[in-house]
Amino acid sequence: LMNRIDYGGRVAVITGAGAGLGRVYALEMARRGARVVVNDLGGARDGSGEGSAAPADQVVAEIRALGGEAVANYDNVATSEGGENIIKAALDAFGRVDIVVNNAGILRDKSILKMEPDNWNAVLAVHLNGAYNVTRPAFKAMKQNGFGRIIMTTSAAGLYGNFGQTNYSAAKMGLVGLMNALKLEGKKYNIKVNTIAPLAASRLTEDIMPPDIFARMKPEYVAPMVLYLASDACEETGAIFNVGMGYYNRTAIMTGPSIQLGEVGNPPTPEQIHGNWEAINSMKGALESEDLNAALGALMAPPAAASGGEKPAGGNRLDVQAV
Ligand code: NAI
């Protein structure tokens, strides 16, 4: 029997928690004893408009009605002052920060030629800069406490690609890069950083999903994964999970086996690249790497055979300071 997941007064900051997925994370964490900062600026789906206190206030009222503890915050994750204020709200109300769920998001879908700088910048600002703006001051508090759980929200659009979402896909994949570095920086402070790619019914997805599928896409099927990753019980760090409709899997950046071409002082030709395309392009036996040393160590380990020798993917470690 697994121990019950209980937050025992830990403090969770959830961005964009006034609606959709974030609202359900906030309610369920509060129900299990977390003290929650419900951040939401209450803007439109594309990030435009004046904003409103109502969404965050309403979720706080719902949490208090359940007997839970929460405070509302209306700051914009897209600015560094906003990020500082969100974490300050947690410190002022509860004296600490243990959990951050970077969840706030907007959409501005357009194909590349119609993707004006405004639409590109607005989406990068909320999703990618937003996670940086909130996580940085939170990391400071977590480091002092020797505990932290940080969750990034990516998307299948970023992991695999989706027509008409260059801005969103780039921002969402940027969060994976942010996680990859931060998981290493957090290691010795017990700060675990993981990423979810959710699939759930919300205003972001209501018009792009068939109605019958939409009905089965409750955020309640995503929340248990976020609650686990946010808990003391979670030992995982640096992983990406697809989560939705009761399905759960892990996905990762994988690297295929290396082949070596050319010799010292004699680089290979483009024709040799062409001629060896099948081997270069192969993902046979692909492995994931814990960090760049592991990945590049495998790339640059002594060749198994002289020229064109094939080596197993991943594996060897070699210290590489920079690339
Ligand atoms: P939602 O639109 O229901 O909730 C997002 C919330 O973020 C809104 O309440 C909005 O007011 C808030 N927000 C937007 N910009 C903000 C800002 N600058 N500062 C503070 N709050 C802000 O959307 P949903 O579906 O719950 O999305 C949550 C996250 O999950 C987003 O990051 C989204 O990209 C991601 N996601 C959702 C998927 C889905 O199937 N619903 C699929 C893949 C990713």
Image (tube, grey):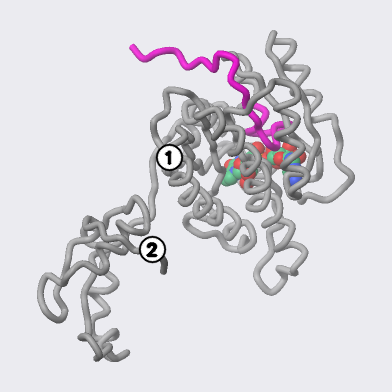
Q: What element carries label 1?
A: helix
Q: Is the stretch drawn in magenta largely helix, strand or loop?
A: loop
Q: Residue furthest left?
A: 305
Residue 275 in the image: above or below residue 18: below
Q: Where is residue 130 in the image (x, y as percent from the top left)?
A: 68, 48
Q: Give the range drawn in magenta.
A: 1-24
Q: How crowded is mark 1: few (under 14 residues within 10 Å), some or many (20 or more)?
A: some
Q: Where is residue 236 in the image (x, y as percent from the top left)?
A: 39, 35
Identity of the residue drawn at 60% across and 38% down: 140
Q: Position of residue 92 (x, y in %)?
A: 75, 25
The one nearer the camera, 196 or 84, is 84
Q: In which quarter of the image is residue 14?
A: top right
Q: What element carries label 2?
A: loop
Quadrant of the rendered image holding ligand 1 = top right
Residue 95 in the image: above or below residue 83: above
Q: Name the residue under label 2.
A: 321
Q: In which quarter of the image is residue 111?
A: bottom right
Does the magenta portion include 168? no
Task: Answer with left or right where residue 251 lies relative to residue 83.
Answer: left
The one nearer the camera, 160 or 256, is 256
Does the magenta portion include 9? yes
Q: Name the residue under label 1.
A: 187
Identity of the residue drawn at 57% across and 53% down: 172
Tell me the kind of residue under disc 1.
Answer: Lys
Tell me the kind of residue under disc 2.
Answer: Gln
Identity of the residue drawn at 68% across and 12% down: 68
